[in-house]
Image (cartoon, rainbow, N blue to C red):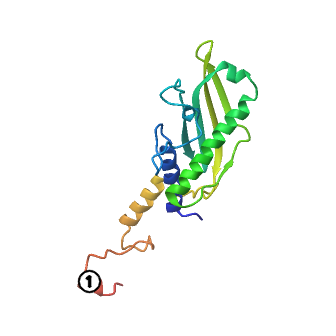
Amino acid sequence: MVEKSNIIDIVNGISQAAANGYDGALDEKGEPLKVGLKREEGNAILDKRVMDGFNATISGNILTIKYHGEILLKDVYKGDFEAEMAQQLQDIASFLKKEYKKITGNSLTLTKHDKEPDVLVQSMSRIRSWVQASQKFKIGGIPDEPEMGTTVEDRLDTAMKKWLGMGKDKFPNTKKPENVKGKRDEETRK
């Protein structure tokens, strides 16, 4: 069974790697950090600013990478747009792996959970459109079925029963109080 602290370390590492991908992030040398987004292409001062970004969410052992950005309609209709979005999501996944390795010193394994990404293109005007793409990846190191413990109510119920049955034979797993010392505690009871 995988330790819970290991799962928390993996989740925290992925979270920090995704947080390092903000617009304007710099690496150790002071160079702009390359995530693989379209906003990094060209000169930020002279060129028209491209609006795009990504987000990562974790549910169980599934990491969902979401990409969103502005695109031109001619880019949608020029051909094989879905493959371009799949490559964009793969670039973001490789950035997360690289940053995770830099942060934790361990490698991150991401395998595609879905074969194809979900791509949604919405029109904003006759020229501009908005794209939202997402791809699910399975995170290595986190089990498929997490440890299914007892519910909060069950744990509270058993704790209350142990507390109420302290010193009784009815609940053999209960501990005797350690802070009470007296003559009658030293004597054997009948």
Residue 97: tell me if it is visible. Answer: yes
Element assignment for label 1: helix
Name the outermost residue toward the bottom.
187
Q: Nearer the viewer, residue 61 or 72?
A: 72
- Taking 133 as reference, is 8 left or right? left
Percent from the top left, x then y, of residue 20?
A: 48, 45
Please tell me which residue is depicted at 46% across the width and 53% down the height of the picture.
152
- Point 61% across, 45% down: residue: 93
Residue that badge 1 annotates? 184
The residue at the far right in this view is: 79
Residue farthest left in this picture: 182
Q: Image point 41% across, 71% down: which residue? A: 174
* Residue type pointed to by label 1: Arg
| Vertical position of residue 39 compared to residue 112: above or below | above
Image quadrant occupied by the N terminus: bottom right
Is 188 situated left or right of 10 in this image?
left
Residue at the outermost top position: 126
> Residue at 56% across / 42% down in the picture?
35
Where residue 120 sits in the image (x, y, percent)? 65, 27
Looking at the picture, does residue 15 appear above or below residue 149? above
Q: Quadrant of the C terminus?
A: bottom left
Q: Position of residue 100 (x, y in %)?
A: 54, 53
- Front-most of residues 144 and 136: 136
Residue 60 shows in the view = no
How many residues crowd around disc 1 within 10 Å: few (fewer than 14), some, or many (20 or more)?
few
**138 versus 166 height, above or below:** above
Image coords of residue 135 (percent x, y) = 65, 39
Judge whether 181 appears above or below 130 on screen. below
Q: Quadrant of residue 165?
A: bottom left
- How many numbered discs? 1
